[in-house]
Amino acid sequence: MGEHLTKKYGLPTAVAMVIGIVIGSGIFFKAEKILTATGGDLKTGMLAWLLGGCIAIASACAFAIMATRYEHVGGAVDYAEATVGSRYAYYLGWFMSAVYFPCLTSTLCWVSARYTCVLLGYDIVGGQCMTITLFYMVLVYFINATAPKLAGHFQVSLTVIKLIPILLMGVIGTIAGLRSGLIVENFTAVVAGDISKYPLFTALAATSFAYEGWVIATTINAEIKNAKRNLPLALIFGVGAITVIYLLYYVGIAGAVPNAVMMENGEQGARLAYSAIFGHVAGTGLFVFVVLSCLGTCNGLMMACTRGFYAISVRNRGPNPEMMGQVDRYTNMPNNAAAAGLLMCAFWGAYFYFGTLLNALDPFRFDSSEIPVITLYAMYIPIYLRFMQTCKEETGFRRFVVPSLALLGAIFMVVAGLFSYGMDSVYYLLVYAVAMLIGRWLEYPKNHKKRDSV
């Protein structure tokens, strides 16, 4: 297919990809949901953050082991192909390219716009917010499609920037809260409200979005220097650091404002917390860093979104693989695949607006920021099982213990999702089935003989 993706990212970029994609939106966006779902019970919220982190770490460790063995194009798609088979790898790649990546990317564009609107005083579901959402979507697409090296440097820079407000709130908010006694008060008092029927499961489902993103770093494995060494290091240390940072921030917020204030003020809650600790001017300045933090996550997701259909095409599957597999000789990017990823972002962005925000697609109104993540955990299960079955040359710890922990984590996340979403899960599965049937219809290009099986 002509040009190929080159090795252009080192270990620092890979680590920044993991931390930068994961941290930056979910900790702000989902903290308020977790508080509401648990009725302000910080102990249950902390447990959900800890469980979500443990599941992500176990999954990252399992994928890190696979990363030392398999390297082609597509990360998780490679691992599915090597363990389960090429057809399963195609369906995993199709889901990630057509549903998972664009769902999360479009949501993050809105989250970035949401906090921009908080600064500007606009409605978070109004026309201004949707215009800013579209602007951010096109902006990060343009950077990734035309200047991938710049996108990588942008990711590293924003990773440093986004840690500033989070760590400041975590450290100073905790100190202030311990001095004032607010942390103790928030941990001992439960606020009455619209508590979820299954608070721990609902909170855990919310953390799935906050922790998700580490797997996206595997999509650039073909572009990472010494990927078999650097990618596992980035996954393990990156996700471990994220868990500690999240817990620290969550305690810091508890030391800044009462739980009731966070729960009542929604998207304004984080800004109020920063203003309470650092003053109005400094708090507003740090909240600008929050917006940049979200944009960094958005950029990282778009890095994966622009490569999704390429990972399918190099396996000679999916819609028009010859066209999707072309790599531009000047930018070293699969521009056609990137454009297809942008179109899917626009589609799922429209769904998120009408379905999730306006609730206009009832009953087909699943939360596209969370359920696709849990679906991906479910699709990892056959990969873990087959890895344990086939990789006989691995040590017992690497072959059985680590994948088993990841398997248990994936099952637990799926169960949490089913309890949390109830009937929404059923309607989502119908949408999922339609998406996969379309993928089945497009699996083989015309005049291409079916030759592979699971």
Image (cartoon, rainbow, N blue to C red):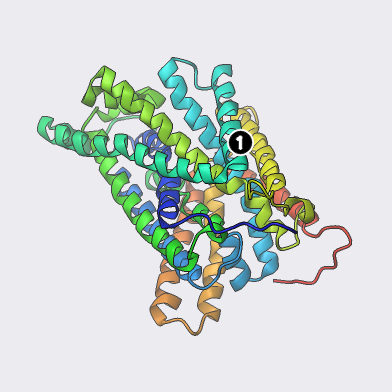
Residue found at x 51% / y 40%:
299
- Could you tell me residue 278's position as x and y percent? 22, 25
Q: How many marks?
A: 1
Residue that lies at the very extreme toward the right in this rendered image: 447
Residue that lies at the very extreme toward the left in this rendered image: 179
Residue found at x 61% / y 33%:
349
- Could you tell me residue 344's position as x and y percent? 67, 40
- Could you tell me residue 33's position as x and y percent? 40, 35
- Could you tell me residue 225's position as x and y percent? 49, 61
In the image, is 232 to the left or to the right of 45?
A: right
Q: Which residue is disc 1 drawn over?
A: 142
Q: Quadrant of the N terminus?
A: bottom right
Name the quadrant containing residue 353.
top right
In depth, the one of 244 and 142 nearer the eye is 142
In the image, is 27 to the left or to the right of 181?
A: right
Q: Tell me which amino acid carries mark 1.
A: Phe
Whether residue 132 can be seen here: yes
In depth, the one of 238 and 275 nearer the eye is 238
Residue that lies at the very extreme toward the front in this rendered image: 330
Determine crowd level at label 1: few under 14, some 14-19, many 20+ residues with C-alpha closer than 10 A.
Answer: some
Determine whether the residue tagged by mark 1 lies in a helix, strand or loop.
helix
Name the quadrant containing residue 4.
bottom right
In depth, the one of 83 and 309 nearer the eye is 309
Residue found at x 79% / y 72%:
451
Q: Quadrant of the C terminus?
A: bottom right
Residue that lies at the very extreme toward the top in this rendered image: 121
Whether residue 188 can be seen here: no
